[in-house]
């Protein structure tokens, strides 16, 4: 595992904790999706972006990440 991957894994843990603590925060879900993309966890990234978009339909970045 590269050092960069370990940083993204740590970031994923932080954002996952944030989502558990406040599941209504679309920005946490969006950022979690970005981290999952970096880790090549694309299905999980799509899920995080979808949830972010459900919470904030005006989230153009999450929509773009989903190809919308």
Image (tube, rainbow, N blue to C red):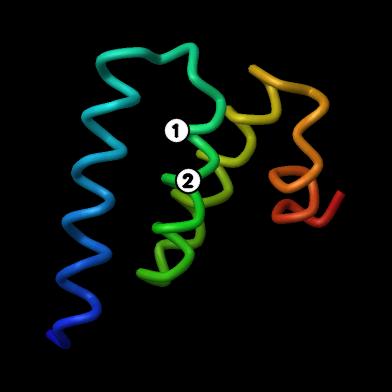
CA distance for labels 2 and 1: 5 Å
- Residue 63 is situated, as x and y percent measured from the top left of the image, at 78, 44
Q: Quick check: 62 left or right of 35?
A: right
The quadrant of the rendering that contains the N terminus is: bottom left
Q: Residue 45 at x, y = what percent?
A: 50, 51
Residue at the location (50% across, 56% down)?
Answer: 34
Work out which residue is located at the far bottom of the displayed protein and give it: 2
Q: Is residue 37 left or right of residue 53?
A: left
Q: Position of residue 55 (x, y in %)?
A: 64, 17
In x, y percent, where is residue 23? 41, 15
Q: Relative to residue 24, is residue 37 depicted above or below?
A: below
Indicate whether 22 appears above or below 56.
above
Frontmost residue, 37 versus 22: 22
- Horizontal side of 16 relative to 23 (left or right) equals left
Q: Are the residues tagged 2 and 1 within 8 Å (C-beta)?
A: yes
Q: Which residue is mark 1?
A: 28
- The residue under the point 87% across, 49% down is 68
Choose between 54 and 18: the one closer to the eye: 18
Residue at screen point 40% across, 58% down? 35
Tally of numbered tags: 2
Q: Label 2's element?
A: helix
Residue 31 is marked as 2
Within 10 Å of disc 2 (Cα), the crowding (few <14, some 14-19, many 20+) is many
Q: Secondary structure at mark 1?
A: helix
Residue at image point 49% right, 49% down: 33
Q: Nearer the viewer, residue 47 or 8?
A: 8
Give the answer, above or below, for where 50 lies relative to 18. below
Classify 10 Å Cα crowding around label 1: few (below 14), some (14-19), many (20 and above): many
Mark number for residue 2? Answer: none
């Amino acid at each position: 595992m590269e050092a960069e991957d370990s940083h993204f894994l740590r970031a994923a843990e932080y954002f996952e904790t944030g989502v558990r603590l406040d599941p209504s925060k679309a920005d946490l879900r969006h950022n979690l999706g970005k981290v999952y993309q970096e880790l090549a966890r694309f299905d999980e990234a799509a899920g995080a972006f979808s949830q972010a978009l459900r919470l904030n339909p005006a989230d153009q970045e999450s929509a773009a990440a989903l190809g919308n």
